[in-house]
Image: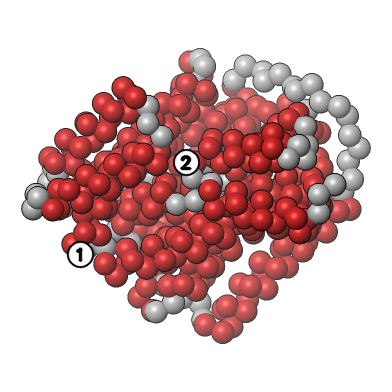
Amino acid sequence: MTSLRALLPVYLKIGLLSFGGPAGQIALMQQEIVAQRQLMEDATFQRGLNVAMLLPGPEAQQLATWLGWRLHGLAGGLAAGLAFILPGTALMIALAALAATRGDEGIVAAIFYGIQPAVLVIVGRAVIALGQRALNGVRPLLIALLAFIALTVLGLPFPLVVAGAALAGFMLPSVPAPDLPPQPMRWGGTLKIIAGFTVLVLAVFLVVRWLFGPEPFDEVAELFLSAAFVSFGGAYALLPYVADRAVETYGWLSPEQMLNGLAIAEATPGPLILVNVYAGYFAGAGGGASVATALLACFYTFAPSFMLILAAAPHVEAMQRQRWIRQALAGVSAAVVGVVLNLALYLGVAALLPGGEIAWLKVGLLGLFAIWSWWRAPGVLPLIVTGMGTGIGLWGLGLI
């Protein structure tokens, strides 16, 4: 058995090279852990992926944590999970600082101008991919449509939409149970993990409040803790909730700045949900506490994720046998399509209708990127880099 110390460089390598969203990140883990080092069988790796996909939270980060837990217990899980998110967190804070101080100036503004249409294409592709996977009948399509209407027209809170979708899942055809070996349920370790993380989160909240006061730290805790427990379907599904609270309720940043944050998260290593760190940075911008609020956003986003994956890991096989869990998750999966479509509309308005006027040049870029995406299916990173280069080129020509 390879020691945890020997695997730390491997975990850091995965964290530094984990570009391209969950699919690419999961493939990198499979290559490093299964194919190259043969530390576990592929069937075991797939069980870990099932664990990550069952729970709320970023699936790639939870898979990294599960792999570390499987190989070296609690210490391994914490080490692997932290190594996966810390490089991207540090880079995100640095780029958020650049966006906050220079985002409206010269070449930096040009870069954001070019990548915004590229990000809209990426989100559009996510809607299509999710729809192809989840909308396999009239009833899932109806759930997706109702979720879109609930968010876009009625303005219902995202957690309420998730709960409604879970209940609506019982209208769907029965989801077959996976063929898994029976395992005994042991709750002692699970309860210790839940208690430990609960005490840690409460302690951080109280210490920060005691040292620095309630604002904006209470708001950061409220938003990102609540988001962590309803983040089914990945960052795209969660982003409308975070954007609504961060932009509309708290006024930390503008819709365009939120879109820029998503673009940065697409272009940096680590889970896409690191966009929360970007929003958290802007939460403290008015009072000079940007780095502190960014770090707290990271903590409140990922502490529940660590708790859930480490607590649930021994019980997932039993959970997957429960029909009500399978049906609820099927309903949420269908609703996620409508949620991400709502995100595409929200970001599209922010990018293409700034100030209420149509940005025709951006519309043209969106069309070109969409044609390229349909024709050649480029990856996320090539789209982002091309958008950056296009923005710089337009700026150099004096067109923006």
Quick check: 158 left or right of 366?
Answer: right
- Of callouts 2 and 1, the N-terminal one: 2
For residue 118, what is the image quadrant? Answer: top left
Furthest toward the left, the residue is: 398
Is 364 or 36 nearer to us in this picture?
36
Mark 1 Cα shell of 10 Å, populated few (<14), some (14-19), many (≥20): few
Kind of residue at badge 2: Gly
Q: Which mark is residue 20?
A: 2
Q: Residue at x 44, y 37 (%)?
A: 339
Rendering coords of residue 318 (x, y %): 81, 33
Residue found at x 63% / y 76%: 206
Q: CA distance from mark 2 to mark 1?
A: 28 Å
The residue under label 1 is: 105
Q: Is residue 231 visible?
A: no
Q: Name the element at disc 1.
A: loop
Return the residue nearer the eye: 316 or 49: 49
* Picture layout, residue 317 above or below residue 94: above
Q: Residue at x 44, y 60 (%)?
A: 92
Q: Position of residue 267 (x, y in %)?
A: 41, 49
Counting labels gives 2
Determine the image quadrant of residue 337: top left
Left or right of 52 in this view: 161: left
Q: Which colour assignment does the render follow? A: secondary structure
Label 2 element class: loop
